Amino acid sequence: MQIGNRFRCYPTPAQEKVLLQWIGCQRFIYNAKVQEDRYFRTFARKSLDHTGQFAPIDQQYSQFKHPELTPWLSEVPSQLLRNGAAKWMQAYSRFFAGLAGRPTIQAKYGKQSVWLTRELFSFEPIKDETGKVTHHLLHLGTKKHPLDCLAFTAHRDYALPASIHLSIHAGRWHVSFNYDDGIAEPSVEEITQWLRSFSTAELSSVTLGLDRGVKIPLAASNGQQFDFRAIEKKRLTQQEKRKKRWQRRQARRVKGSGRWKKAKQRVAQCQQYATDLRRDFCHQTSHALVADPAYKLYVFEALKVKNMTASAKGDTEKPGKNVQQKAGLNRAILASGWGQIKVYTQYKALRAGKLCIEVPAHYSSQECSHCGFTHPDNRHSQAAFVCQSCHCTDNADTNAAKVLVKRGVALMLGEGVAKKKVKRARVKKQKVGAECSKPAGANQPTLVETWVNRPDGNILAYRSMKRETPATTLCV
Ligand SMILES: [Zn+2]
């Protein structure tokens, strides 16, 4: 399976200067390819000279090397520039595969990285007295452009990669390895087949439902709750305050000046703290979930985080209401790391031979996990759930997670999930006095539910309305 490692590295000031130059040159080639492609696609079809020609999609970059216009491109290894063009080609092939949009201009600000292939770096093994390799030295550069040894700290074991990425963000450098460890990963189909051989009771006992929320980031159906520690919450608030203070300072300083750049970097550092903390929380939580040998199937509710965190701003004609409150909720949703926890659990589960699926989320917080009675009154308060039908009580988040287990098991064993009741107002459009000979139920849309195994390991439910072709009846 593919393994990715990201280690902190510490270039010297001289190395840092050269690496930044490398990053800039590779980005220049990438952006030049993007612009060239845009030029061809906009003008080629209009100009007679280019009639019948397609925009070239290749890895050529020599046209951008000019002794007077771009002399700096000759100061860096040419393999770097080729990698820039190759990166653009890869991005384009992702577009053709339907995985992404067309390549776009890479910004000069924010996270920056450079892709180095085998010709641009080498590993030198360092052995101890017994002849065992303890660590490696990473040499950068070519014969013509040597860059000496780059110091990095490996916090875990690694294999030697075929290519590396060097990146800088918020003043910190990282080196990323990517390699195949040779261990075969079980496919989603194999695990699904295996889980389908279970009975309902067996599968229910090895299934863990996971309810994501704003108050508690993650609640499991076995009663476990995952949340940030008190000290972490305190530090997050402190960093948020510090960030706001530096943002105010940045706004007052002259744009582009040295003091402005310093303030900008401080803002990025405060932001980076929060990002690191959340990523760490998501990794630890997903690891704890998958490491539990009692569970084989993890069920999340399908949340459209992007739609849920849309702004309430509206437009000039129809200004939205409660924009600030909605912005606060959005921030809380994004801060809970909903998406990240799911993505991490998915790939970690697959490595462990387990499965992570999504089920429709409708009314999971109002449904009773014992009797299935669904009503808004069941939700007594934010935390308490009291069923109005069977009077059982539970923690609201735990109950929702148990409902997800039921749905996940039903989905796996092919029984499907109870459909959401579609409320629809019926409008009769008939002329006064007219008599319509339409048979009852004709031309009424029916709800069709399809389950699809997605390549990323999700099983997704699509609901679509199907309407039969209208019967040819005439209303006079
Ligand atoms: Zn009940």
Image (cartoon, rainbow, N blue to C red):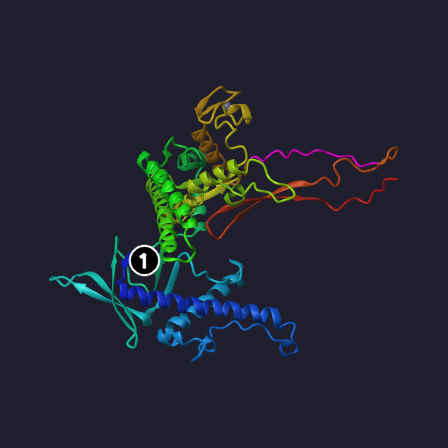
Give the farthest residue toward the left. Answer: 129
Image quarter for residue 294? top left
Where residue 149 appears, as percent x and y from the top left, is 24, 66
Residue 419 part of the magenta-drawn span: yes
Q: Is residue 236 above or below residue 78?
A: above
The number of discs equals 1
Where residue 19 appears, as percent x and y from the top left, is 33, 66
Quadrant including the N terminus: bottom left
Determine if residue 437 is in view.
yes
Given residues 401 and 407, the one toward you in this image is: 401
Q: Is mark 1 within 8 Å of ligand 1?
A: no
**Residue drawn 39% across and 60% down?**
112
* Amino acid on which the number 1 mark rests in the picture: Trp
The residue singled out by tag 1 in the image is: 173
Given residues 26 and 467, the one toward you in this image is: 26
SS type, badge 1: strand
Given residues 51 and 389, the one toward you in this image is: 51
Quadrant including the C terminus: top right
88 relative to 117 in the view: left or right = right
433 relative to 165 in the view: left or right = right
**Residue drawn 85% across and 42% down?**
474
Where residue 84 appears, as percent x and y from the top left, is 42, 68
Q: Give the crowd class for mark 1: few <14, some 14-19, many >=20 residues within 10 Å.
A: some
Question: What secondary structure predominates along the stretch shown in magenta?
Answer: loop
**Residue drawn 48% across and 28% down?**
369
Where residue 69 appears, as percent x and y from the top left, is 45, 76
Give the farthest residue toward the top. Answer: 391
**Residue drawn 52% across and 43% down?**
304
Determine if residue 86 is in view.
no
Q: Which residues are magenta?
A: 418-430
